[in-house]
Image (tube, grey):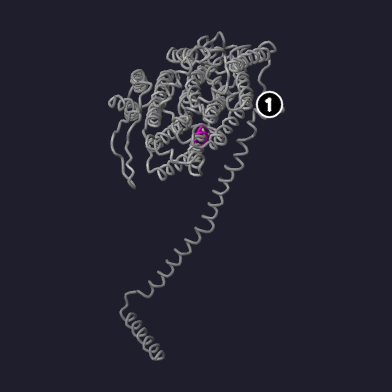
Amino acid sequence: MENLVYTIILLPLIGFILNGLFGSRLPKTVVGALGTAMVFIPFCLSAYLFMNFDANSQPVIVKAFEWFRVNGMQVNFGFQIDQLSLMMMMIITGIGTLIHLYSMGYMSHDKGYYKFFTYLNLFIFSMLLLVMGSNYLILFIGWEGVGVCSYLLIGFWYENWEYGKAARKAFIMNRIGDLGLLIGIFLIAKETNAIDYLSVANIAPKFAVDSPMVIFICASLFIGATGKSAQVPLYTWLPDAMAGPTPVSALIHAATMVTAGIYLVVRSNFLYTLSPTVQEGILFIGILTAALAAFYAMRQNDIKKVLAYSTVSQLGFMFVALGVGAYTAAMFHLMTHAFFKALLFLGSGSVIHAMSGEQDMRFMGGLKNKIPVTHLTFLIGTLAISGFPLLSGMISKDEILTSAFGKSPIFWAILFVIAAMTATYMFRLYYLTFHGQFRGTKEQADHLHESPSNMTIPLIVLAFLSVVGGFINLPHLIGAGQYSRLAHWLKPVLTEQSWELQEGLAGNISHTTEYILIALTVTMFFAVWFLVKNTYVNKKKMALPENEYKGWERLSAKKLFVDEMYNVLFVKTVQGLGRAGKMFDKDILDPAVEFIGDGAEDSGSAMKRLQNGNVENYVLIMSLAIGIILIVNFFLQ
């Protein structure tokens, strides 16, 4: 196993080095094939480990070397292979391979082709380091690595000033969260004298439930998660990150990087179970994020912006699951979301490719027969996220809703409304894009065409996974046994208290109640589908320009003016402080420094007249000095 683990982690790094050093001199086909192979081979090896790993096995630690010792604490650079890390490895390398393959077609005419694959490989390496590391410090290195890669990829088309601003915004907002994560790691090291997961998990029970220290540690780690996983208040960077090429949106902002916060909380379940107060906070932040983002998505006209806010909302659902203690439900939705959201982002890229770069849905329409493969796969992704019965999104989201009901029917009702909003904005996106009359230019109509096979094959694979992915964790009512397969798989990763909390949620709900809840969600789905289709197909309602929206539609289109508020409160404030600092530097510090310099120069000039090399003057000055000393000495006696 040791050699396989090293191979999995090192191959993307090798791809980064080779393409970075020699990519500019290699044919694009070789660059793309090399970058894709350096992710596909780790996927195959991860699948091999996954299939040969016993669901009841304890974690396997692969120690690379002893890193350092401090205050009696030994820190090793090593990797932890267990049920959770294997699941994440499969998602990262599997979805990563499909996105690399897609990028070979999507980026084929870009002059920075080799740089793009270089950054993608570095991102995959950093993400694998994050999930495979055996301690919090290695996680932090991978955490920072994906942050740097996101900056490089979001601002990949750096000649566009707005894209550069979006990259800086993502970088800065992530740094805010990263400070919280770093403080949490320092506190863990201080309180336990360890930072590897197994040692901290063994020591954690010494903390009293909801003690100030465990609350502070969990809250600090969660601040890191809110930055990386785009939760309130650190969520506004993710929609702006759509400035990057579409494969970046699919890889970073749908399937991998934004799920790092979910992984962190699940990995640290031994701490969060000891802090019900922080878990309650996670629950309310998740609900607020899911609701706000769903509301924003209702009246966005940019196809990628709708999907971006959808991602934020779905991440909110995952944090709700974590907040109620349903760790398996959170990981299940993380997995299915990776399937259908990567499909939707890549599908939107195929639409944009066909539309010669157009992203505004108001200028699309009628694409159903022009790009049939993209249309069919996109429809499957839309049905999955909206809750079509037995598709992956419906099953995983229903598990979160059921867990929320086990906590309180009020939480279920709120999430039920948000799920209805999800179906509404997704069907609106679908019908505006693929149905009705084509609303673009004649030049765009003449160039409409289906994407090449290296772009459509990933769409087909992801569509298949979006259909069957839910069967990995069927509810026990449908026949998966007393406990779900995924819950059994992840059980060794969870502490006994975490497992009992999760089990208790299901125990609070009778079979009859669960049947009723499923029936309500299915009914809601078909009702929303009918209403949206009637609005945008039968009544042929079109999306309006933002300045023509009124009431709640204007608030949705303008995202409740949160970006503008942040701009006034933080951006303008910092810029003002910067200008004040510049004025202080120019008008006060510079003159002060120049005054000192001028004084030194003037004194030097005066001394220069005295030090003129004339011996007679030196003798005269010496004599005068001796005379003054004698006179002073005489009067002092």
According to the picture, the residue beneath numbered tag 1 turns out to be 553
Which residue lies at the image location 49% right of the left edge and 36% below the top edge? 274
Rendered view: 414 above or below 196: above
Which residue lies at the image location 42% right of the left edge and 36% below the top edge? 144
- 527 vs 9, left or right, is right
- 23 vs 427, left or right, is left
Where in the figure is residue 71, as x and y percent of width and height?
34, 47
Magenta region, residue range: 162-170
Q: Nearer the viewer, residue 250 or 187?
A: 187
Q: Quadrant of residue 23?
A: top left
- Tag 1: amino acid: Glu
- 516 vs 101, left or right, is right
> For the stretch drawn in magenta, what is the main secondary structure?
helix
Q: Secondary structure at mark 1?
A: helix
Can residue 222 be seen in the rendering of this structure?
Answer: yes
Can residue 164 be seen in the rendering of this structure?
Answer: no
Rendered view: 531 above or below 491: above
- Please state, as top left, top right, bottom left or bottom right, where the C terminus lies in the image: bottom left
Q: Nearer the viewer, residue 451 or 324?
A: 324
Label 1 environment density (alpha carbons within 10 Å; few <14, some 14–19, many ≥20) = some
- Please state, as top left, top right, bottom left or bottom right, where the N terminus lies in the image: top left
Where in the figure is residue 442, as x and y percent of width and height?
59, 14
- 9 vs 447, left or right, is left
The magenta stretch spans residue 294: no
